[in-house]
Image (cartoon, helix red, strand yellow):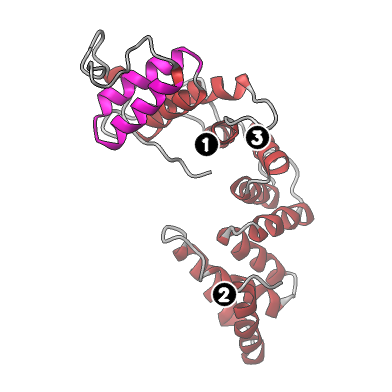
Amino acid sequence: MRVLLLGATIASLVAGSASAFDIQSGVTKESGPFDLFKFGFKAYKNGQKEDAIEAYRYAAEKGHTGSRWALANMYAYGDGVTKDDFEAFKIYNEIAAQGIEPGSEDTGFFINALLSLAGYYRRGIPGTPVKPDLSQARQLYFQVASTFGVAEAQFQLAKMMLSGEGGGASIQQAKKWLNQARRNGHAGAMAIFGNVLFQEGQTVRGLAFMTAALDRCAAKDCSWMQQLQEQAFSVAGEEDRRGAVALSQQFAQGAD
């Protein structure tokens, strides 16, 4: 899930500030949580981050999940303030512990919180009680991958299964999740899925997936995908290369 809101932290809020809620806005700290959330979102988009924080804080205190999520992102990304991963972790954990009802409008916030927690458990947060816990990270990725079908969770779960992080290694299970993720449009999953097939001897098909992935990759990921593809391309025969390039065009258009 892509994080949509970045911002500042509650620590930067000036206690008792009334600047956020002027008489023309029609919003006060006593307003309903959704009105506060909307005010905060608008303030953030306008670059008024302290005002946004104040509104989000009041809405979060009234149980508004989206506002909690926004505050957690502010801590996590340190946008204009000191980054504080532990504070972000605590808020994400509150969202996860709260749970959701099926079909809830808060589902996206819940999923994002679980993915963020998985990342924190995977690497830990230095200087805090949050230590690396690969088993917990893998469990969270599995929850999001299986319950919600989120491609990024499927991709991360597959990578952990390939390397045996947080549990036993399983190439077959990893292939299953990679295949689902790449069908859901995840370029990284397509590249690694192709590499696994290539290593198993499916030269043309594997190289074709790696080649097709290059047409979909985000800028930050293109480098490692290209390296993977070029390495395979260099050891493939000329006939296999031509076949892979032709097949990759079909894959790029969504054909399997």
Assign a secondary structure to mark 2: helix
Task: Look at the magenta stretch and give its main secondary structure.
Answer: helix
- Whether the residues at callouts 3 and 2 have beta carbons within 8 Å, the answer is no
Assign a secondary structure to mark 3: helix
Q: Residue at x 64, y 70 (%)?
A: 254
Q: Position of residue 22 (x, y in %)?
A: 22, 17
Give the residue at mark 2.
Answer: 211
Mark number, residue 123 = 1
Q: Residue at x 65, y 25 (%)?
A: 100
Q: Residue at x 75, y 70 (%)?
A: 200
Residue 235 sits inside the magenta stretch: no
- Magenta stretch bounds: 34-63
Q: Nearer the viewer, mark 1 or mark 3?
A: 3
Q: Is residue 150 above or below residue 33?
A: below
Give the residue at mark 3.
Answer: 140
Residue 241: name its quadrant.
Answer: bottom right
Kind of residue at disc 2: Thr
Lower sequence index among marks 3 and 2: 3
